[in-house]
Image (spheres, rainbow, N blue to C red):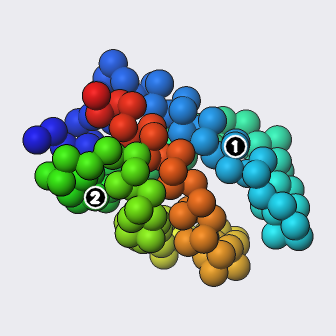
């Protein structure tokens, strides 16, 4: 069975995968509502305007680690002959935990107190936000795994 990191980071696919990840992120931010949604939108807009290209660079940097972290879920979907997108959605908590383990580690190793403090403030709601993105992420994985 193919490894998810090979599927998503293959030279002929990686740029398209990154672009689709950016589209997912934009859609997820756009879908947020209420006070927390306003805060997320404001923070996201600020990052995009202050550091153009930062989000894309972060996705490019994190994609290989995310793919490795998600590979057990991907392998389980393949082993069960389950549609990958549906399997990811049914296992959204597991997917979110795998992704957040990577970002938790990055935040802990950061030498910036601002990064650590900001991450700590947002971490409480992160799992819910990541879980809401899993259906889109699952569709992306399914598309590129074909």
Query: Residue at the top extreme?
Result: 12
Q: How crowded is mark 1: few (under 14 residues within 10 Å), some or many (20 or more)?
A: few
- In the picture of the structure, the residue carrying the numbered disc 2 is 73
Query: Residue at the left extreme?
Result: 1
Where is residue 98, by image quadrant? bottom left
Image point 38% across, 69% down: which residue?
A: 94
Q: Are dots 2 and 1 in contact, CB under 8 Å?
A: no
Q: Relative to residue 21, is residue 39 depicted above or below?
A: below
Query: Camera-side residue: 113 or 76?
Result: 76
Give left or right: position of 136 versus 11. Answer: right
Image point 14% across, 52% down: which residue?
A: 79
Q: Where is residue 145 in the image (x, y as percent from the top left)?
A: 29, 33
- In the picture of the structure, the residue carrying the numbered disc 1 is 27
Query: Camera-side residue: 73 or 9?
Result: 73
Q: How crowded is mark 2: few (under 14 residues within 10 Å), some or many (20 or more)?
A: many
In this figure, what is the number of numbered marks? 2
């Amino acid at each position: 069975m193919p490894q998810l990191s090979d599927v998503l980071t293959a030279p002929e696919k990686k740029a398209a995968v990154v672009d689709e990840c950016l589209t997912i992120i934009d859609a997820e931010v756009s879908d947020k509502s209420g006070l927390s949604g306003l805060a997320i939108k404001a923070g996201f807009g600020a990052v995009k305007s202050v550091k153009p290209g930062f989000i894309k660079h972060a996705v490019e940097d994190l994609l290989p680690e995310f793919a490795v972290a998600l590979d057990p879920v991907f392998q389980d979907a393949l082993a069960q002959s389950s549609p990958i997108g549906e399997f990811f959605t049914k296992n959204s908590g597991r997917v979110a935990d795998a992704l957040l383990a990577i970002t938790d580690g990055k935040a802990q190793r950061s030498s910036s107190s601002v990064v650590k403090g900001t991450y700590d403030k947002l971490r409480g709601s992160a799992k819910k936000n990541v879980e809401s993105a899993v259906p889109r992420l699952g569709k992306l994985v399914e598309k590129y795994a074909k």
